[in-house]
Every structure is written in C-alpha cells, then in structure tokens.
Amino acid sequence: LGHPRLASLSNREREVLMHLVAGERVPTIAGKLFISPHTVRNHLKSIYSKLQVHSQSELIVLVRGLAS
C-alpha cells in the first residue's frame, strides 16, 4: 500500500483498505480494529472519494492493479 496514489489516505484508512483487499467484510474489519461497522463504512466512503471510485469491488481492482 505504498503507491503514491494512496498517499492521501490516513493511517486508519490504509488499515481498513488492507483488510478489505485481504477479503475481509465490514463487520470483521470493525471487530479487528475495535471500531463500529458504521465507522468502517465512513472510512470507506472517504477512501472512495479520495481515490475516485464508487464501490468496494472497484476499489479492490484499483488497489490490486497498483500493486502489480
């Protein structure tokens, strides 16, 4: 997750993104990070805005593409 396109993400947003790309669902991510599912979704909305994507699947495709 060190790509320049991801530089605008906060540390917490990077954590959420890492778990999402690993295939974890919102409730699982929330439990692992000790935050509510609502907070995870808020982080995802912020990530979508910063990376100009509109869905989890679009986000995952983008991040996997950046990693390759």
Image (spheres, rainbow, N blue to C red):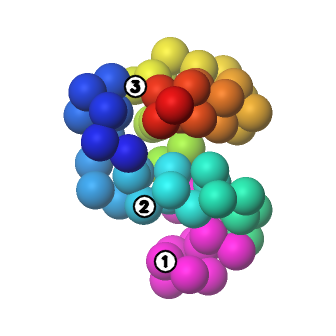
Q: Residues within 10 Å of mark 1 (few under 14, many from 20)?
A: some
Of 39 and 59, which appears nearest the observer? 59
Query: For the residue marked with disc 3, what is the amino acid?
Result: Lys
Residue in the image at 56% along x and 26% along y? 65
- Look at mark 2 in the image and give the residue it sits on: 15
Q: Secondary structure at mark 1?
A: helix
Q: Which label's residue is closer to the chain start, 1 or 2? A: 2
Give the residue pinned by disc 3.
Answer: 50
* 66 shown above or below 35: above
Q: Is residue 7 above or below residue 11?
A: above
Q: Which residue is mark 1?
A: 33
Q: Nearer the viewer, mark 2 or mark 3?
A: 2
The residues tagged by marks 1 and 2 sit, at their Cα atoms, a distance apart of: 8 Å
Question: Residue 20 vs residue 23: left or right?
Answer: left
Q: Nearer the viewer, residue 2 or 34?
A: 2
Q: Residue 48 at x, y = what percent?
A: 53, 29
* Residue type for callout 2: Glu
Look at discs 1 and 2 and give the one toward the viewer: 2
Instruction: Say whether residue 35 is magenta.
Output: yes
Q: Which range of residues does the magenta coloring cover?
A: 28-42
- Residue found farthest to the top: 52
